Image: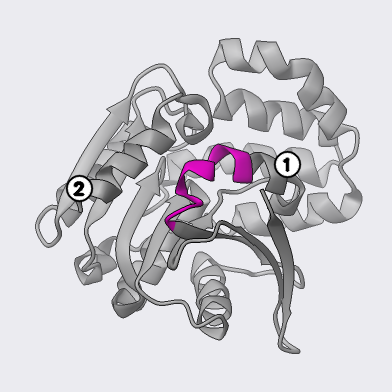
């Protein structure tokens, strides 16, 4: 599969993104919070989402490169919209996972005319003080320069125990390559979660929505998924599915996750 790597730079925003597929409809993916740039996983993401490559052109956007604190979820949404607009994208199928789901919700509420269908994975419309303690723990490890401790803690919370155990050696190897610059970037991105709350804007989402969560989500529990569904079902065409046994990163671990999205898109 051909993957095209791109770099947007308008003098104020520098953002990398990649695309693949040959379809005439845009499918935009906004990944979640990560320690390493999503650009390093371009091949794996393209392979995982290759079933969309015939009908869609798939775009995967990173966060901006030149970030400074504070950098809010709203800032991330505005940056992504600016790049999407520069590409002339419209009638977008938008999929956001975890923090990417928060960005996607923000985009869909502020720019409903851009979005034709919205898919949300393991995300929340707001972060409680109790939930933010998880991000505080990660930030503390990053500030101390403990890249291995951060990466292992991060992966333990994202994945089920058996998946973590299977890939622990890989995670340790990946952690050894984390730079001081990546730790600083992670801190800024993680701290953006602290005051996030878009609950009162959910009624502005107009597109059909598929929400996928996980009962065993150790980062953003399934109550957050249910809360979004309860709010959106009042104003949108909504479908909800909750996994059990695949953890926060069900979007990576559930074997039928992408097929579930494809089936929903066919029905719409």
Give the CA distance from mark 2 to mark 1: 45 Å
Q: Nearer the viewer, residue 144 or 14?
A: 14
Which residue, as the protein is rendered here, is positioned at the far bottom?
11
Q: Residue 50 falls in which quadrant of the image?
A: top right
Q: Residues within 10 Å of mark 2 (few under 14, many from 20)?
A: few
Answer left or right for 252 relative to 140. left
Which residue, as the protein is rendered here, is positioned at the far left?
234
Q: Is residue 236 visible?
A: yes
The residue that disc 2 covers is 267
The residue that disc 1 covers is 140
Main SS of the magenta segment?
A: helix
Answer left or right for 73 relative to 184. left
Residue 106 x, y percent position in the rendering: 39, 67
Residue 218 part of the magenta segment: no
Q: Nearer the viewer, residue 173 or 49?
A: 49
Sooner in the amino-acid sequence: mark 2 or mark 1: 1
Answer left or right for 105 relative to 5. left
Q: Nearer the viewer, residue 134 or 105?
A: 105
Q: Viewer-nearest of labels 2 and 1?
A: 2
Q: Which residues are magenta?
A: 46-55
Number of numbered discs visible in the structure rendering: 2
Residue 47 part of the magenta segment: yes
Q: Secondary structure at mark 1?
A: helix
Residue 240 x, y percent position in the rendering: 22, 39
**What residue appears at the point 74 percent right and 33 percent down from the top-left corner?**
151
**What residue appears at the point 56 percent right and 30 percent down from the top-left corner?**
158
């Amino acid at each position: 599969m051909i993957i095209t790597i791109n770099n947007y730079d308008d003098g104020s925003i520098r953002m990398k993104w990649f695309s693949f597929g040959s379809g005439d409809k845009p499918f935009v993916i906004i990944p979640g919070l990560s320690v390493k740039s999503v650009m390093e996983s371009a091949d794996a993401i393209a392979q995982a989402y290759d079933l969309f490559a015939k009908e869609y052109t798939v775009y995967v956007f990173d966060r901006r490169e030149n970030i400074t604190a504070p950098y809010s979820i709203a800032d991330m949404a505005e940056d992504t919209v600016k790049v999407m607009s520069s590409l002339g994208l419209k009638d977008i199928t938008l999929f956001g996972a975890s923090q990417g789901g928060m960005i996607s919700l923000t985009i869909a509420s502020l720019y409903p005319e851009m979005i034709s269908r919205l898919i949300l994975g393991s995300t929340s419309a707001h972060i409680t003080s109790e939930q933010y303690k998880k991000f505080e723990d990660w930030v503390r490890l990053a500030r101390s320069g403990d890249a291995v401790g951060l990466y292992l803690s991060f992966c333990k919370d994202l994945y089920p125990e058996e998946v973590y155990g299977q890939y622990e050696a890989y995670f340790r190897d990946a952690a050894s390559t984390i730079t001081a610059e990546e730790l600083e970037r992670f801190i800024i991105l993680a701290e953006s979660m602290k005051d996030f709350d878009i609950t009162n804007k959910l009624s502005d989402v107009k597109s059909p929505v598929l929400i996928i969560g996980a009962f065993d989500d150790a980062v953003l529990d399934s109550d957050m998924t249910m809360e979004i569904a309860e709010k959106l079902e009042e104003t949108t065409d909504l479908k909800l599915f909750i996994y059990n046994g695949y953890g926060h990163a069900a979007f990576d671990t559930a074997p039928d996750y992408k097929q579930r999205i494809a089936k929903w898109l066919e029905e719409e």
